[in-house]
């Protein structure tokens, strides 16, 4: 049989994987090594060479897009329709099984699927019907609790509250919510998986049917499987004649925060004893980029191990840029993108990657100023994010009480007991009197037209806004925004209502909004028009929010988080904010396993680059309302010196001498230095020049000290 169309375009390792004869196989597919090609050609090999029935193949991946791509490539390669193939996501496959066996699974045959928003609303209704306080049991937090338990395969009766009343109540909400789903014939996404596992686990005949049906089970992105997904794989592939073929990369497991278990790769090796095939030839990046990524990921323990390589060109060195602050960092990156575009390359070939969504604002502003189209991949532009709009609504109402839209947005955010019925009454009264909502509220408070609870709640809201308006008279715009976020308790509001990772992202965006107001300078045109700084800032925010970002089909620079970048590739990549505490994130040093995942995230980011890779960090950065002097990320320090080129020499103390001995050079902000008496510390400030300059250093043990440069003998450390 002629198999050239299946094997000729494959390299040796890919051929080994496609033609493997062992019952079970683990394909460790490095970044850019052609894993989708291997899966598609494996399906072709099984059908055309091993004469497997298409009906006996089950191929599972993580996104509908990936499943659709795989199905299309199989059709193109085999020239046969793929309708008989079971190719889909875990949830899609489980839905297909449950539709066929709803009665056996204890489901209404006409069950409906709850999406995430519908699930949230049902949980919220359940909490209200149980007469519980949403502040104490926020629906988003409860939703996360329920889904996490289901992803672990756990029903309410199997959870031990451990004597914790809060946990015990969460379990009861879970039980009540699930009962409501059963009554209404509703199934959430996590339930699709759990119900399928229970169906197969508790029904030997049905399990045997699917084991006989699917002689070949193939799983893509195996490193992203959670506990329940791995349980399903073990059930389906547990028969004597089963053949399990999984493709994954433990070095690209970056979703632990949403339940993925990188240890499943090791568990698979332990449970199934597969043949292991490593795909290490990369078809995306230059040798320099790959070598640098290899050396960074080598610092992680407990890897299966592989070493990416390419037959491609050596490529340019990795550029490292040390900016004075985040503004200079953004200007530098956008300047390089301008050079790229002016050289004839396309904007869409460039991507800016960052650890935190809040970092996007500066790049958005700089791109707008440069008139370069851009798109925030997988997310909203900064001024369109809900928490930013909430804070700006407070600022708008303080600035202009007649702003009815702002009033309605934040009158009950955070929740203060002002329901929709009360707002509707205010709206109707305002329409009747032809006055604003603010004026109508004051009128009803003064005339006693409101009931006790609504009256007290609205009086508290009015007092809050008036107090902020008084503070606006005595502080600048940055100080006012700081007070708005503090006194409105928006951060506490999100912490109470949402899972920790989402609440943290919202706080980072609010911190960035404070920074934006602190650094804002009105345009000459706004000043000439007599606009106050507040009015000018609100105008700019509205205009930036109104500037529609590029559509998917447009030629735009791509802005995205490192998590969103997985699976993508770009000729020119910038990884911004490479500082300790930002990336790796501060919390990664506090939780077991998090630092390894942060390093895998750095590896993923680096391997997105095809031709040029820039890493940048700022010596000082405004975060959480403070100017922080950070150190370069350890991931920058893990790069081999021979592969790196400093775009500008990294600023540091070069030699431990008094200024008069080396021409008056002074240490830079953020430098780590050592003093004979006070020990190690970080340079916070430098005032003046030469040997009479004053240097403020925050010593690790002795605290902040001012030293005179001419007498402070400092040595560089780190």
Image (cartoon, helix red, strand yellow):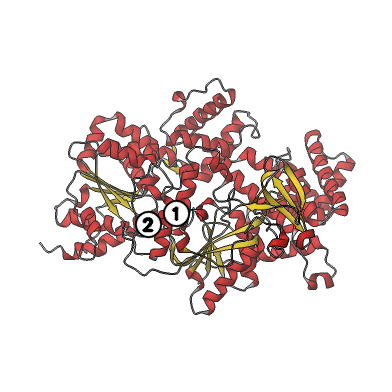
Q: Secondary structure at mark 2?
A: loop
Q: Secondary structure at mark 1?
A: helix
Looking at the rendering, which quadrant does residue 694 occupy?
bottom right
Is residue 102 visible in this depiction of the protein?
no
User: Which residue occupies 40% across, 46% down?
Assistant: 224
Relative to 137, 522 lies left or right: right
What's the distance in space between the residues labelled 2 and 1, CA to CA? 9 Å
In this rendering, the answer to whether 301 lies above or below 170 is below
The residue lying toward the viewer, choosing from 293 and 217, is 293
Please identify the residue farthest to the right as the structure is shown.
446
Q: How many marks?
A: 2
Please identify the residue farthest to the top as the structure is shown.
163
Sort mark 1 into few (<14), some (14-19) or many (20+) by Cα contacts within 10 Å.
Answer: many
**Residue 395, how many percent across, how many down?**
77, 54
Query: Which one is earlier in the sequence, the residue at label 2 or at label 1?
Result: 2
The residue lying toward the viewer, choosing from 449 and 302, is 302
**Residue 704, how many percent across, how many down?**
74, 45
Q: Which residue is mark 2?
A: 31
The residue lying toward the viewer, choosing from 467 and 305, is 305
The residue lying toward the viewer, choosing from 226 and 542, is 226
Q: Are marks 2 and 1 in contact (CB under 8 Å)?
A: yes
Q: Which label belongs to residue 510? A: none
Q: Nearer the viewer, mark 2 or mark 1?
A: 1
Q: Which label belongs to residue 603? A: 1
In this rendering, the answer to whether 213 lies above or below 511 is above
Please identify the residue farthest to the left as the structure is shown.
1
Relative to 593, 20 lies left or right: left
Is residue 27 visible in this depiction of the protein?
yes
**Residue 256, how many percent across, how many down?**
46, 43
**Residue 44, how many percent across, how many down?**
21, 57
């Amino acid at each position: 049989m002629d198999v050239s169309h299946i094997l000729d375009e494959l390299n040796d390792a890919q051929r080994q994987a496609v033609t493997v004869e062992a019952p079970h196989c683990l394909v460790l597919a490095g970044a850019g090594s052609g894993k989708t090609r291997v899966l598609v050609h494996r399906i072709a090999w099984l059908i055309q060479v091993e004469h497997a029935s298409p009906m006996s193949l089950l191929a599972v991946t993580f996104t509908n897009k990936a499943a659709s791509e795989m199905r299309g490539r199989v059709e193109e390669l085999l020239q046969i329709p793929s309708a008989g193939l079971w190719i889909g996501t875990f949830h899609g496959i489980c839905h297909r099984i449950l539709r066929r066996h709803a009665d056996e699974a204890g489901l209404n045959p006409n069950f409906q699927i709850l999406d995430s928003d519908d699930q949230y609303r049902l949980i919220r209704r359940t909490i209200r019907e149980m007469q519980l306080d949403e502040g104490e049991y926020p629906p988003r937090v409860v939703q996360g609790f329920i889904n996490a338990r289901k992803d672990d395969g756990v029903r309410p009766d199997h959870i031990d509250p451990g004597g914790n009343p809060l946990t015990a109540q969460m379990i009861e909400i879970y039980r009540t919510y699930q009962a409501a789903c059963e009554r209404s014939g509703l199934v959430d996404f996590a339930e699709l998986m759990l119900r399928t596992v229970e169906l197969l686990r508790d029904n030997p005949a049905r399990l045997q049917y699917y084991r006989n049906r699917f002689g070949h089970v193939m799983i893509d992105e195996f490193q992203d499987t959670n506990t329940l997904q791995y349980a399903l794989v073990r059930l389906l592939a547990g028969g004597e004649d089963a053949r399990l073929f999984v493709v994954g990369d433990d070095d690209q497991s970056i979703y632990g925060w949403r339940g993925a278990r990188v240890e499943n790769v090791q568990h698979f090796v332990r449970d199934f004893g597969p043949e292991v095939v490593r795909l290490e030839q990369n078809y995306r990046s230059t040798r320099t980029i790959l070598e640098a990524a290899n050396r960074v990921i080598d610092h992680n323990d407990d890897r299966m191990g592989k070493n990416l390589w390419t037959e491609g060109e050596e490529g340019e060195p990795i550029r490292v840029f040390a900016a004075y602050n985040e503004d200079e960092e953004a200007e530098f990156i956008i300047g390089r993108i301008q050079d790229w575009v002016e050289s004839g390359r396309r904007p869409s070939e460039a991507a800016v990657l960052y650890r935190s969504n809040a970092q996007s604002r500066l790049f958005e502003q700089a791109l707008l100023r440069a008139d370069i189209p851009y798109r925030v991949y997988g997310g909203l532009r900064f001024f369109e994010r809900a928490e930013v709009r909430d804070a700006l609504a407070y600022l708008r109402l303080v600035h202009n009480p007649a702003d009815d839209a702002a009033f309605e947005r934040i009158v009950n955010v955070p929740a203060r007991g002002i329901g929709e019925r009360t707002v509707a009454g205010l709206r109707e009264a305002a329409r009747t009197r032809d006055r604003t909502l603010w004026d109508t509220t004051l009128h009803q408070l003064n005339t006693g037209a409101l009931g006790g609870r609504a009256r007290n709640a609205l009086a508290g809201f009015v007092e809050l806004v008036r107090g902020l308006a008084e503070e606006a008279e005595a502080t600048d715009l940055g100080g006012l925004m700081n007070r708005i976020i503090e006194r409105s308790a928006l951060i506490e509001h999100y912490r109470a209502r949402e899972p920790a990772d989402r609440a943290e992202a919202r706080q980072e965006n609010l911190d960035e909004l404070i920074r934006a107001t602190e650094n804002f300078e009105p345009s000459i045109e706004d000043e000439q028009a007599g606009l106050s700084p507040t009015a000018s800032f609100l105008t700019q925010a509205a205009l930036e929010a109104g500037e529609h970002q590029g559509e998917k089909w447009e030629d735009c620079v791509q802005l995205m988080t490192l998590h969103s970048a997985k699976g993508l590739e770009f000729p020119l990549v910038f990884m911004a904010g490479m500082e300790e505490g930002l990336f790796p994130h501060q919390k990664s040093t506090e939780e077991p396993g998090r630092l390894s995942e942060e390093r895998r995230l750095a590896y993923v980011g680096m391997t997105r680059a095809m031709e040029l890779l820039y890493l940048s960090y700022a010596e000082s950065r405004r975060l959480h309302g403070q100017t922080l002097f950070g150190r370069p990320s350890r991931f920058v320090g893990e790069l081999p010196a021979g592969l790196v080129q400093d775009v500008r020499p990294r600023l540091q103390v070069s030699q431990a001498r008094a200024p008069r001995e080396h021409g008056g050079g002074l240490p830079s902000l953020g430098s780590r230095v050592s003093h004979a008496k006070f020990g190690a510390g970080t340079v916070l400030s430098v005032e003046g020049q030469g040997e009479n300059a004053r240097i403020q250093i925050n010593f690790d043990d002795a605290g902040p000290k001012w030293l005179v440069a001419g007498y402070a003998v400092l040595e560089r450390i780190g």
